[in-house]
Amino acid sequence: MDKYDVVVIGAGPGGLAAAISAKKEGAESVLIIERDKEPGGILNQCIHNGFGVEIFKEDLPGPSYAERFVTEAESLGIEFMLDSMVLEVTPQKKIYTTSKWYGFKEIEATAIVLAMGARERTRAQIRIPGFRPAGVYTAGSAQRFVNIEGFMPGKRFVILGSGDIGMIMARRLTLEGAKVERVLEIMPFLTGLTRNYVQCLQDFNIPLQLSHTVNRILGKNRVEAIESVQVDENFNPIKGTEEIIPADTLLLSVGLIPENELSRKVGVKMDTLIQGPFVDEEMQTSIPGIFAAGNVVHIFDLVDWVTEAGFTAGKGAARFVKETKEKSDLVKLVPGNNIHHIVPQYLKKDALQNGPIKLMMRVIKPMEEKVWVELSDGKNLITRKLERYVRPGEMVILTVPQKAYDDVKKAKELIVSIEKFGG
Amino acid sequence: MEKFDVIVIGAGVTGAMIARELSRFELSVAVIEKESDVCMGTTSANTAIVHAGYDPVPGTLKAELNVRGNKLWDQVAFELDIPFKRTGDYVVAVGDDEFKKLEVLFERGKKNGVLGLEILSKDKTLSKLPYLNRDVGGAIFAPTGGIVDPFQAALAPMENAVINGVHLYLETSFIDFIFEGNKIIGIKTNNGEFLSNWVINAAGLYSDVIMHKANIHPEFKITPRKGEYYIFDRNEFAIPDVLFPVPTEFSKGIMITTTVHGNTIIGPNSHEVDDKEDTSNTREGLEEVYKGASKLVPEINLRHAIAIFAGLRATGNARTPNPNIDYHHDFLIEAHPQLGLLNVAGIESPGLASAPAIAERVVELLKDSGLELKEKKDFNPIRKPRKRFRDMSNEERAQLVKENPLYGRVICRCEYVTEGEIVEEIHSPIPAKTYDAIKRRTWLGTGRCQGAFDTPRVVEILSRELGVSPLEVTKKGSGSYFLLRKTKEVENG
Amino acid sequence: METRKFTCLGCPVGCSLTVYIENGEVVKVEGNQCNIGIDFAKQEVKDPRRKVTTTVKIRNGVHPLLPVYTDKPFPKGMIMELVKELRKIEVEAPVKMGDIILENALGTDVNIRASRSIKRNG
């Protein structure tokens, strides 16, 4: 089975930042598992600029921003498992993945960072009546086709939602020779950035209608038209304001939902208000050692803040790995001369920092004379106690004092034995 | 010109089950279907319930075939690898008036021969179903009720029929009968003429149109009745039970049920429409469905709905054959031996539950009409189970992926459908050639992201496996293209 | 005196600017929270420019399209002509982030550069 200090799920900006900071903060083996064929996440299809203004003080296109982090991750020796899907994460921090390339794998992690991002809200969640023809896309799906696969879904578009993704796509489609007939927004205000309204809609004379929504989708096999309608202050359609807009494609830009199926399955406590896991200041979830970063926690506005959250989560993951390693540094207690057994059988190396420790023993043979009960590291005596006798029927107790902290911490093993007094 | 012993018109669950039964015998059989795939009519959009049989009026064909079909489903599901679960179902009464009606239903069920029916008190009902409306009066529990994969209910028997020699002609629609004197000797279709001794009309919403072309039962009319539905994200809101309200004369009511994959579905309402192709959702219909379902389970939150759809029931106006029973919406299953026509019409609820029994009945009618039925020695009733990654244990998955790496690539991340399964369906006996065809066979795209992740990948796979440009890949055939052109190839510069 | 109102595109804040123009020169700017607003207003009045991002075809790469950007703001009025020109271009993989794809586009002294690296296929 493969074992890693830190496994990051998702190679988008959140995951990349978490992996980089985990590595820089001391985690030795870091793996990122990504379902797409290359890292970068959603940034690969966000070819517009606006990224990095805070972190790099530069205005970068999405793919450039991603590449900087991918290059850094690769140079730090972070491993990537691409085109691989995580099926399950268990509370014991086992990860099951499947891939055409690597087969079905079970991976063990000391710390995990969940960075699965978000998915888009779909038609049913906003309940648009009409038929279910081809030609209805979420803005992100269309963006993938146009920018990565190299295909235009249609030539006449209506966009529902004045969020940034919708407006960016309005401009994108126009630049690639399509006509965006209308952008409809159900709210009475713009939901994206004003500057995007200017440089995506206004610059290209694309009409925006606030307090409007899609009343019906027309067309059985392929979208033929979109019926728009004005809504009142309760978002109910106002009869008589319906307008049929000929179009062959409808894009939905109506919100993002954090993608938390894996989080739910592993059992982290979920905040139902925002549909993401509860996290502390380290981005640690309710399961110690499982962290979360990016849109999977809540929907961010700037990718720069996602990167920062990723840095925080990665740092937390590295901290967790370090602590786990230290805790699992145990020293064994070995029965020496005339000792049958000792309880506890192991001490954590820094156990004495919390106080003295009682060792409990039984002897093999009775000795009806004064004896030393001695604790040593094999070379040097650490502590000892005088007993009048030792008998198998009676438990022997030796208290290790706090001042023995350094000796115990350095010891490779600890031996307790019974020695005759005066010899 | 092709000549057959029997032609079946319609590849929904009825036509498919009939074809499968016929494929047991030394007969040359053809099925014609106007759509681009099996199971695109009523069978693709319903509540997917195998009813117990307490609802139909005693003495009707519906009652008889429902109860008989219900019994047959275990065997059929096993042989054909159709996901089927005998969950049992509840009829929930809200308030005391409705509770009184439960008695009627209970007695009716007993008369119809339904086994194991129980009436539960208010307290017992609430203890079993704690999420119910507190005003519930009680419930009937019918342990023989079940849920089924409605797509496989048609796809599986049709595939088995094809493997056993039945010819399937898709995108082939009936135009008219070919007569020789007063006998039907074949049919005219948009893909040429097919000769046959027998024609079985299992054409669902169009079964009236077809029988009228032979001047049979001019008074018989199919009235399409639309039912709308919501599907919910099973991670957010999932009720594992099958809950009916107390039924009305016309419909079993707006219910809450679960799919074989654990997604809660609410619906259907019931409204007559004129257009036999009108499967559009409406604002009013969806509102009605939500209100009806909330009556049973107040905590339903539409925020968790991931899909909506609508189906049309083929409601007929045939009178029950038994003259003592005054019921006017029964199945019409009737052979006309001189003509060579057998009509299987008005198959609305409990059509899915009854389908195996309807097929059985059709074979009996053919036999009684003199058709020679010699059993095939090499008939294979078993459809080899599909490998379904989602249903496998981790050990099975590891083994499967090792044998065929394509099963290691998950394409639909919500429902865990792999590339291997998609490729298998594209090359199966009834090849999946469109996105929706793959969706019906694998449930890909039915999860919470509703195809956002899988669509570009499915387009790529279909393009590759079918050897066509991605521009030619469609959602459901005829004009439902996904992509118009390449990004850089604009029509006029 | 002419008054124009527009949104500053200099940073995500998007201040609403009121710009006073006399004889074609900007004499006063109101509504800006920093000097970027003043520079933007002057430029927008004299010669409105925008950053443009799009894609070009790429041959033998792991993707069929390469995302590109203008390395300086580009004249707004020529954007549609620019994308039309870029549609004709096909570059050859591999390409490195920052590589110039088209120098001095349409004589504007603005270069079109690759937004990312794309490896060669196979």
Image (spheres, grey):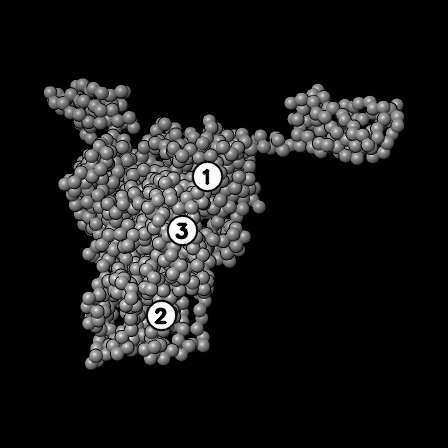
Disc 2 is placed on an element classified as: helix
Amino acid under label 3?
Ile
Rendered position, B118 above or below A56: below
- Verify CB contact (< 8 Å) between mark 2 and mark 3: no
The residue positioned 24% from the left and 32% from the top of the image is A190
**Of tags 3 and 1, which is closer to the observer?**
3
**Of tags 2 and 3, which is closer to the observer?**
3
- Verify CB contact (< 8 Å) between mark 3 and mark 1: no
Amino acid under label 1?
Ser
**Of tags 2 and 1, which is closer to the observer?**
2
Disc 3 is placed on an element classified as: strand
Location of residue B115 in the rendering, given as x and y in whole percent from the top left corner = 44, 59
Mark positioned earlier in the residue sequence (2 or 3): 3
Residue located beneath label 1 in the image: A263
The residue positioned 24% from the left and 43% from the top of the image is A173
Give neighbour class at mark 3: few <14, some 14-19, many 20+ (Cα, 10 Å): many
Residue located beneath label 2 in the image: B361
Same-chain check, marks 2 and 3? yes
Residue located beneath label 3 in the image: B140
Location of residue A67 in the rendering, given as x and y in whole percent from the top left corner = 40, 38
Q: Which mark is residue A19?
A: none
Which one is in front, B399 or A187? A187
Rendered position, B484 above or below A300: below
Quarter assignment of residue B57: bottom left
Which one is in front, B131 or A31? B131
Q: Chain of mark 2?
A: B
